[in-house]
Amino acid sequence: MSSLFPGLSEADMKYFMLISQTALHIVVILLLASIALRLANKAIRLFKGYMLSRVDNNSIELNRIETLGNVFRYIFSVIITIVAGMLMLSELGISIAPILATAGVAGIAIGFGAQSLIKDYFNGFFLLLEDQIRQGDVVNVAGIGGLVEEITLRHVKLRDYDGNVHYIPNGQITTVTNMSREFAFSVIDVRVANRQNVDEVMALMQDIAKRLRENPVFKDKIIDDLEMAGVEKLEDTASIVRGRIKVKPLAQWDVKREFLRLLKTAFDDHHIEFPYPHMVMYPGQDKNGGVQPMHIAQEAGK
C-alpha cells in the first residue's frame, strides 16, 4: 500500500485508511437510509391504494386517507433519520451514549411538561386512523356540538349553529357523538292536552309523514316511513306522543322542522289543543264527606 503512496508514512497511511473506512461506512449508512425511506414510501403508497380500493370516490374519504398517509410518512422519516444520524455520529467517533442519556433526561422533562400535547397527538392519530371524525361531519365532542371544519393531529375545529368557532384539543376528547354516519332519526315528541284523543293525534302524524315523503323537497331526504312509538309519557297536563322518521345524515333537523310546521297547521284545522299550565283547586272534605263551598271575590279596583 505504501508503494502506491510513496510520500506517506505508515502512520499517515493508517490515518488515511481509517478516514476512508469511516467515509465508506457513512456512505453505506446514507444509502441504507435512502433505501429504507423508499421502502417506507412504497409501503405507504400500497396502504393508500388498498384503502382507496375499499371506498367510493368520496372527497372526504380521500382526504382522510391522504392525511393518514402523510402522518405515516412523517413518522417513518423521523425514525429513519434519527437512527441514521446516530449511526453516523458513532462512525465519526462521537459517543452517542451521552447524547442518548441527555435525550432521555430531556425527553422525561419535556414529557412531564408537554404530556397534554403528546396526548393530543396520540388521540388525534387514533381519531383519524379509526375514522371517528371526518371533515364535514356534525359531532358533539367535549360537550360542544358543531360542524367539523378541520381535523388535525393536534385539534378539531368546530363551528356551531351561531357561527362560533371552537378549537378542541384532541386530548380532551373522550367520547365522540357523530350525527353524520349512514342514517339518522328525526325524533318527534308531540305534547297534547290530556283530554285530547291520542289515536287521532297519531293518525294525523302518520298522515303528515306520508305527505312529507311525497314532498319533492324532502322525499330524497327520507329513507323510511314514520315509526310510531306511541304514548311515551303521561304528565299532569299533557300526553307525550313519540315517533321517529329515518332520514339521511344531516337531514334530521330539516325534516323535523317541516314536520312540526305541518303538524301545527293540522292541529289548528282539527282544533286539537296543546297543553297549557293550569291549576286545580281542591278544598278538601269534612268528616261526613261534604265539601265546603269556596267563595271567590274580586277586590275593588282589581
Image (spheres, rainbow, N blue to C red):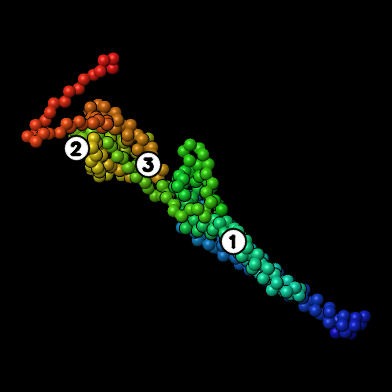
Provide the residue designation for mark 3.
252
**Which residue is at a point 20% across and 31% down the rendered structure image?**
280
Q: Secondary structure at mark 3?
A: helix
**x and y percent of residue 3 in the render?**
89, 85
Q: Secondary structure at mark 2?
A: helix
Provide the residue designation for mark 1.
112
Residue 199 disc label: 2
User: Which quadrant of the view contains residue 84?
Assistant: bottom right
Upstream in sequence: badge 1 or badge 2: 1
Upstream in sequence: badge 2 or badge 3: 2
Question: Where is 143 relative to 203, above or below?
Answer: below
The amino acid beneath tag 3 is Gln
The residue lying furthest to the top in this view is 301
Q: Residues within 10 Å of mark 2 (few under 14, many from 20)?
A: few
The residue lying furthest to the left in this view is 288
**Which residue is at a point 51% across and 39% down the rendered structure image?**
164
Q: Secondary structure at mark 1?
A: helix
Viewer-side label of 3, 1: 1
The amino acid beneath tag 1 is Phe
